[in-house]
Amino acid sequence: MKYKRILLKLSGEALAGNQGTGIDPEVLATLSEEIKALIEMGVEVGIVIGGGNIHRGVAGATKGMDRTTSDHMGMLATIINSIALQDSLERCNVFSRVLTAIEMKKIAEPYIRRRAVRHLEKKRVVIFAGGTGNPYFTTDTAAALRASEIDAEVILKATKVDGIYDKDPMKHEDAVRFDELTYIDVLNKGLKVMDSTAITFCMDNKIDIKVFNVFEKGNIQRVVNGEKIGTTVTTQK
C-alpha cells in the first residue's frame, strides 16, 4: 500500500452516470463498494464531491444569475451529493461523516479540522461538503485545501477518462495521453485537470495528483497500491 491517507475528488457529473443530471443509485453503489475495499485495506479516506450534476455556479452566472448566489446554490448541491454518498456507504456498512463548510447542524457536522482528522483515524470516511464555504472557489480548490489540512499524501482525481490528454480524447482520436506531468507543464499547456488555483495550491504544498478512470473496477485500489495507472501530476519528474 503506497498511500495511507488519501483525498478522493469526485465530480458531481460522475454521480449522474449516463443520466447526465441527478444521482444514479447504481453509480453510488459501485463507488461505495470501491471505497469499502479501501477501508478494508486500512486506507484513511477523505472525499470532496462537486455539484455539477445538480447546479454549476459558473454556468448559472453566464446565464445572468448573480455569481455569488449561483455559487451558493452549487455549494448546496455538493451537500446533497455528499448526503447521498453517505447513505450509500452506510448501506455497505461503512461508517462515514459529512462535514460541511456551510453550517447546518441538523444535517451534517460543521467542518473542524481536528474533528475531521480524528474521524479519519477511527477509519471513518470523511465527506467534505459545501466546497470552501466561499463563492468564486471551485470544489477542485476545496479538494486541494482539505487535502493539505488533513495531511493527505495524494489527491485522487476520479474521472471518466484514463488520464490527462493533450486534447479531449472524446472528440479527437489522435489525442495523446501523458503518463506524468509537472504542475508547471499543466499550467503552461493550459491542460484542464483542475482549475489553476487548485493546481498552484498543490504545487506550493507539494501534493501529487493522480488522474484516472474511476469507472474501471478496482482502479482506486490499484492507484493506492502504487500501480502506474492514469496520469501523475507532481512537483518534478
Image (cartoon, helix red, strand yellow):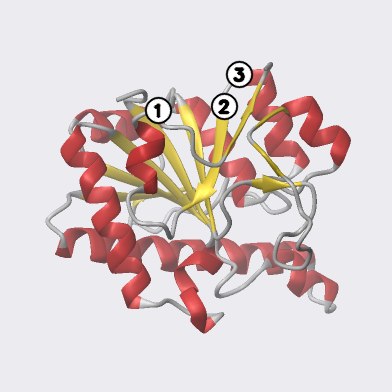
Secondary element under disc 2, as helix, strand or loop, is strand
Q: Nearer the viewer, mark 3 or mark 2?
A: 2
Q: Which residue is mark 3?
A: 206
Q: Which residue is mark 1?
A: 226
Q: Position of residue 10 (x, y in %)?
A: 49, 54
Is mark 1 in CB contact (under 8 Å) with mark 3?
Answer: no
Spatial CA distance of label 3 from label 2 is 6 Å
Secondary element under disc 1, as helix, strand or loop, is loop
Against 7, residue 25 (above or below) is: below
Disc 3 marks which amino acid?
Answer: Lys
Horizontal side of residue 38 vs 23, given as left or right = left
Q: Residues within 10 Å of mark 2 (few under 14, many from 20)?
A: many
Extreme-left residue of the structure: 93
Is mark 3 in CB contact (under 8 Å) with mark 2?
Answer: yes
Along the viewing direction, whichever of 165 and 70 lies nearer the viewer: 165
Residue drawn at (54%, 80%) of the image: 21
Disc 2 marks which amino acid?
Answer: Asp
Q: Nearer the viewer, mark 2 or mark 1?
A: 1
Callout count: 3
Against 181, residue 68 (above or below) is: below
Residue drawn at (55%, 68%) of the image: 13
